[in-house]
Amino acid sequence: MPISIVDEAIIQHTEEHETSLILGCGGDLGLGGLNMNVRATRAGDATISEARFCQEEWEDHG
């Protein structure tokens, strides 16, 4: 799924459910409390979305 569509869905979810939006160091969006960011990654000549899961209090440095 294109990252722009995933970003829109995350923003819409935060607005509808009053959850927090987190921003990774590369501009990646995520939902507060889930310990997950959505990133763009290369797949051959295409760019696709991927989920990056992490432990609580983990800082994303790229």
Image: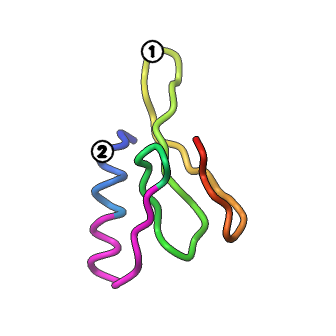
Q: Which residues are magenta?
A: 11-23
Q: Position of residue 8 (x, y in %)?
A: 28, 56
Residue 24 versus residue 47 in the image, above or below: below
Residue 19 colored in magenta in the image:
yes
Local crowd at mark 2 within 10 Å, few (<14), some, or many (≥20)? few
Q: Is residue 56 left or right of residue 30?
A: right
Residue type, numbered disc 1: Asp
Q: Would you name the residue on which mark 1 appears?
A: 45
Which scheme is used to colour this image of the protein?
Answer: rainbow
Residue 47 versus residue 19 in the image, above or below: above
Which badge, 1 or 2, is on the more N-terminal residue? 2
Q: Would you name the residue on which mark 2 appears?
A: 4
- Does the CB distance between marks 1 and 2 fall below 8 Å? no
Q: Position of residue 46 (x, y in %)?
A: 43, 22
Q: Position of residue 17 (x, y in %)?
A: 35, 83
Q: Position of residue 5 (x, y in %)?
A: 30, 48
Residue 49 versus residue 46 in the image, above or below: below
Quarter holding the N terminus is top left
Q: Is residue 26 left or right of residue 12?
A: right
Q: Which type of secondary structure does the marked residue at label 2 adopt? A: helix
Local crowd at mark 1 within 10 Å, few (<14), some, or many (≥20)? few
Q: Is residue 19 left or right of residue 52?
A: left
Residue 14 versus residue 50 in the image, above or below: below
Residue 52 colored in magenta in the image:
no
Residue type, numbered disc 2: Ser
